[in-house]
Amino acid sequence: MLDSLNELLWIVSTYLWGLPLSLLLASTGLYLTLKLRFIQVRGFGRAFGFIFPAGQSSDWVGQSGRATPALGELNYYQALSTVLSSTIGTGNIVGVATAISVGGPGALLWMWVVALLGMATKYSECVLALVYREQSKYGHTRGGPMYYIENGLGQRYRPLALMFSACAAIAALGTGDMVQSNAISSALAEPLSRYISWSPSVLRGLIGIALFTATVLVIIGGLSRIAAVASYLVPFMVVSYLLAGLISLTLNSHRIIPALWEIIYCTPSPRAVAGGFAGGGVWLAMRMGVARGTFSNEAGLGSAPIAYATIKTDHPVKGGLVALMEPFVDTILVCTMTALVVITSDLWKGDISGAVLTSRAFQAQLPYLGGLVVPLSLTLFAYTSILGWYYYGERCVEYLLGAVSIPFYKAAFLLALLVGAVAKLEIVWNFADLANALMALPNLLALLLLSNVVRERTEDYFRKNM
């Protein structure tokens, strides 16, 4: 019975995350890009002025120039760090390597395309989250797709808001919790077992307990503590990973130009050739690149607006400009670094994929330290994803059942974290993938129906701030 359910979930989730949802996400990004006149290009430079400390004072300045208390809890940098903490995860290491091993180096080219289109999607999500956000009776800011669906589209669309919230809460328990804790225990248990005379299964349990403790210490402090931890960890883990990649590429600089040619010409992988897809190298690269790119940066999924709604700002477009930086960091920087290290290693032409492929690529090209890069990066990436996704799940459960449900969800989240560290998660993966797909559908519909609101706010801001 369980095997039949798992197979059904796999078939449905694989179909949704294949051509249908990938094209829907990409086409929505293209539509918004054109409608907003390439906002990711003309607004890119402005975002830096808000993210870094010099731009933070504008949080409390209105159009009149007077100091005005803006609704919100986080500054731009904290909000971006919180969202990146959940976005940069196992997909940046595992998903990218899998895409290249199956679709060939050309998959990276399509990841770039998806990232550029996703920047417009993230911008629109954030603008709508800020336009339609609410303030709770306790003074906290609440927002996200469930609020802009209900408040922007009207009560008749409330079932879609409920559908999004339910699926997002489930996805937080699966993709954002159990899968991430499993990735951490898997990444650390085997290396540690070489130095400690305990079995990997025992080590996985101990790692789960340590992870449980570290997570409790952060989430009991609410959004402010999650944002504070993310503000420190995210820059450290991103810069460290990029630096390790740059050193690796520098030591093997003679392979970079050939790798770029393989990307541009969509060289098919040996698996594609063996499977009879050699002539469809471009198509397979596009399919894998679009699927992994959208899964990595989560543009259109609807999770990020929940955190962006808490930005302290006097104009929604300012928050939107900050949000469009997220796919750039996640995909253009982090995913690209993974891909280039893997491609220049030539190991993608073999029979390995996923985290093993990325790990061996670093080991082969970065002497002494290469073996540590993936386990440590995967641990940090996954841990911060747990923190970010907990906040998303909590807000969705609060929308569905009220604040009284939060302690129960917190207990369920922490229990799932422990289980995820030691259990086999094939059915959890498939169920969470399906929940992710189903939460994207109402969000994408709302983005399309409310795109005029985004355009009006965008034109208003740029007209006043030329």
Image (spheres, rainbow, N blue to C red):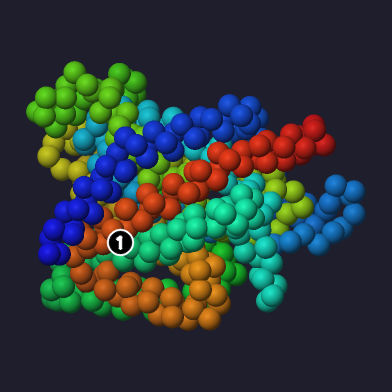
Image coordinates of residue 364 in percent, x first then y, are 22, 42
Circle 1 crowding by C-alpha within 10 Å: few under 14, some 14–19, many from 20: many
Q: Nearer the viewer, residue 258 or 113?
A: 113
Residue 451 location, quadrant: top right
Which residue corresponds to the image point at 16% horizontal and 54% vertical from the top-left? Answer: 7
Q: Give the amino acid at mark 1.
A: Val
Residue 282 location, quadrant: top left
The residue labelled by disc 1 is 179
Residue 334 seen from this side:
no
Q: Which SS class for mark 1?
A: helix
- In the image, taking residue 218 as reference, residue 432 lies left or right, namely left
Image coordinates of residue 321 in percent, x first then y, are 64, 42
Which residue corresponds to the image point at 18% horizontal and 58% vertical from the top-left? Answer: 6
Which residue corresponds to the image point at 62% horizontal and 64% vertical from the top-left? Answer: 142
Q: Nearer the viewer, residue 82 or 4?
A: 4
Q: Residue furthest left?
A: 274
Q: Nearer the viewer, residue 400 or 372?
A: 400
Q: Quadrant of the N terminus?
A: bottom left
The answer to whether 273 is drawn above or below residue 173 in the figure is above
Image coordinates of residue 202 in percent, x first then y, are 17, 77
Q: Nearer the viewer, residue 417 or 245?
A: 417
Image coordinates of residue 423 in percent, x first then y, are 20, 69
